[in-house]
Amino acid sequence: MPELPDKPERHHLVTVALEDYFHVGAFNRLIQHGQWYRFETRVERSTRRTLDLLDEHGIQATFFVLGWIGEHLPEVVREVAARGHEIASKGYYHRSISQMTPGEFRDDLARSREVLQRASGQRVLGFRVADEWFTPQDVWALDVLCEQGYEYDSSIAPMLWRWGAEPWRRFAHTHTFGERQLWEFPISSLDHFGLQVPIGGNWLRQLPPALTRRAFVRWHRDYRAPFVLYFHTWELDPQQPKISAASMFQQVRQYRNLDRMPGHLEWFFKRYRFTSVARHLGLATDLLGRPAPLVPAPPPARAADVATRIDSVRGGCSLTPVTIVVPCYNEELILPYLANTLRSVETRLGDRYEFRYVFVDDASSDDTWQALHRTFGELPRRTFVRHGTNRGVAAGITTGLRAAATEIVCSIDCDCTYDPHELGRMIPLLDSADLVTASPYHPQGAVRNVPTWRLFLSRGLSGLYRTVLHHRLATYTSCFRVYRRSSSMDIRLDYGGFLGVAEFLGRMDLAGRRIVEFPTMLEVRMIGRSKMKVVRTIGGHLKLLARLGWARFTAASDGPRSTMPPALDASPSATRGASPVSV
């Protein structure tokens, strides 16, 4: 394709969706709004990359920003505005118009506009829906935008034959409601054999570059309406954490060709002129009087800071000491997610419990050991223990039990597939038990996004365990538990991996210990891969069931033992504080 010697004087529009990688619509069913705080925030760095790219080409763009970011990361919004770009709204949460009633939509518009104007000091004049695009059945939303005083919208994306009955909707046009008018700037599309294919964002990465560039040149030549180009800030962050729970289709949609995105944008920016929607319409985004000085949001609190704040308000209150054991194997990528979750647990439950932590690195082959020190090194009341060889998750829990110095010991999954906040309800149950175990398969429990095969396997195995053991539980394989340490230390295990988790409960059962089941929710792992080997695990469970069954029905159970098995008995001289321990 021949290059243009000079940029033509005519301006097109460039719009940027300012959101983080875990906000996107592709993951809406996997990641709930209430979980956003758990993820490593990367929107600051991706936004700065976007701003630097635009500055390099002298472009002022329109940034459609989530209100959530305006409230939680106002300094990011202020920097975008300070560098000469327009701030527009993308709603508060990443929701589609189909998820809201007209009243909820009005409230969402007001909430997001208020926080964005406060953060940026600009008038918020435009809107784009965060998830999905407006359909012909959603035109009522344009009426609401008119009513709420918005000047323009950019929520229509002509796709396939969706707006075929109104072909003029493909180009910039006005929508009238009463005495007010609203400009609509649809996402520009490629007309391919009578079907419309949007150009920009995900489509810009998925379609062949030659096709999108040829479509842009043809648009510039044949149409007077401005071309509306769009992309997301996270598309300039190819190193973003991968959401492993996403389907193959979702992963292709999210991650394919991220490394090519800067080059795609460079091609357009070098050859054509772009501007923001407000500048195109001649609208002023003047400051709303004199904006209040932005108080920079504090950096994410370190676990040590949270613990210090809690200590400062405890006064003379007597807190229950509790140790949380976290077995880790190749968990480098999930540790920021874990750290954010534990900070929230400290904040919510720190007025009742004094938490201590034992992090057990089960001979990881990645950078988990160093990452544990970077992430939790300043945490008070913590212990690091490292196995010399890989022993499995049950061995990690057992090592943690031995390293703990409290009577109450909790074990959690490093990936937080069970919500650690539930410890606030599980720990009190230990008053009448020796072990409290989480149960998603309990009638009052729940699962979310867990693969069907895993549900079938776990429920089937639980049914077999119920025929062998005294306690009739719904779940026997959960790692999320609360232990009475004095009742647990003499339990002998033959298995150190996932089988050992079920074996521990089985040995407690056969030893006559009191076990309480707590119904809770199990969610799919978000980042990284499960370490379970399915076929090997099934065979192992069948062997374990046979052992436990033989032990019960022949009255030859080992029962409680005074020593740990040799494989687990390499006891660390665990020290609390700065000294890590290897085992």
Image: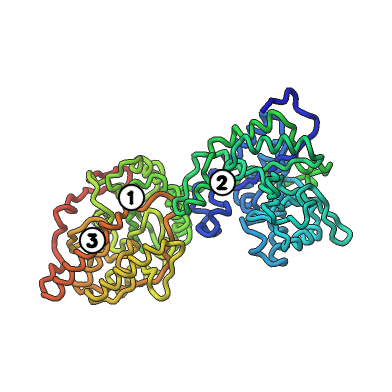
Front-most of residues 166 and 432: 166
Mark 1, residues whose alpha carbon is within 10 Å: few (<14), some, or many (≥20)? many
Up/down of 99 relative to 236, above or below: below
Q: Secondary structure at mark 2?
A: loop
Mark 2, residues whose alpha carbon is within 10 Å: few (<14), some, or many (≥20)? few
The residue type indicated by label 2 comes to Pro
Marks 3/1 in contact by CB < 8 Å: the verdict is: no
Judged by depth in the image, the label closer to the viewer, 2 or 1, is 1
Where is residue 248? Give x, y as percent.
47, 51
Please identify the quarter of the rendering in which residue 463 is found: bottom left
Residue at 68% across / 45% down in the picture? 192
- Residue 185 badge: none
CA gap, disc 2 to disc 1?
29 Å
Where is residue 464? Give x, y as percent.
26, 72
Who comes first in sequence, dot 2 or dot 1? 2
Residue of label 3 = 539
Please identify the quarter of the rendering in which residue 563 is found: bottom left
Residue of label 2 = 298
The residue type indicated by label 1 comes to Cys
Residue of label 1 = 328
Q: Is residue 411 left or right of residue 416?
A: left
